[in-house]
Image (spheres, rainbow, N blue to C red):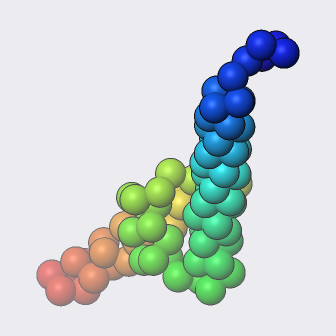
Amino acid sequence: MSKDTLPEEVKSIKTRNRTSYRAKSYAFLRNQWEQGIFTLLINADDTEGLVHYAQRVKPSSLEMQIAVLNAELQRERIKMKRIKSKTQ
């Protein structure tokens, strides 16, 4: 922009900048909220919920990824125990 920039153009640039800023802020907050749900599910010891949620939202931290893998492993172990008990 310069002194010769038309007022309409300045207004348009300001509007685009605000829109872009809001979109970036929203994306950051949404990501924080989505990752926070992993913590809630882990603290609630909800392995089924954790596994299902991880199918929709990818955990971003290594800690959360490990927790999801452990929940999947625990779920598979429970399935195997049920299968064994039915066949005996």
Res 35 → quadrant:
bottom right
Res 48 → quadrant:
bottom left
Residue for point 77% across, 13% down? 4
Quarter of the N terminus within the rendering:
top right
Quarter of the C terminus within the rendering:
bottom left
Q: Position of residue 83 (x, y in %)?
A: 22, 77
Q: In this view, does 1 lie above or below 54?
A: above
Q: Where is residue 29 in the image (x, y as percent from the top left)?
A: 68, 59
Q: Which of 55 and 70 is in front in this view?
A: 55
Res 24 → quadrant:
top right
Q: Which of 21 and 67 is in front in this view?
A: 21
Q: Where is residue 62 in the image (x, y as percent from the top left)?
A: 68, 47
Number of numbered discs on residues = 0
Residue for point 59% across, 77% down? 41
Q: Nearer the viewer, residue 74 or 39?
A: 39
Q: Nearer the viewer, residue 88 or 79?
A: 79
Q: In this view, does 2 lie above or below 88?
A: above
Q: In this view, does 17 lie above or below 26?
A: above
Residue for point 64% across, 27% down? 9
Residue 17 seen in the figure: no
Residue furthest to the right in view is: 3
Q: Position of residue 72 (x, y in %)?
A: 44, 63
Residue 14 seen in the figure: yes
Residue for point 63% across, 32% down? 8
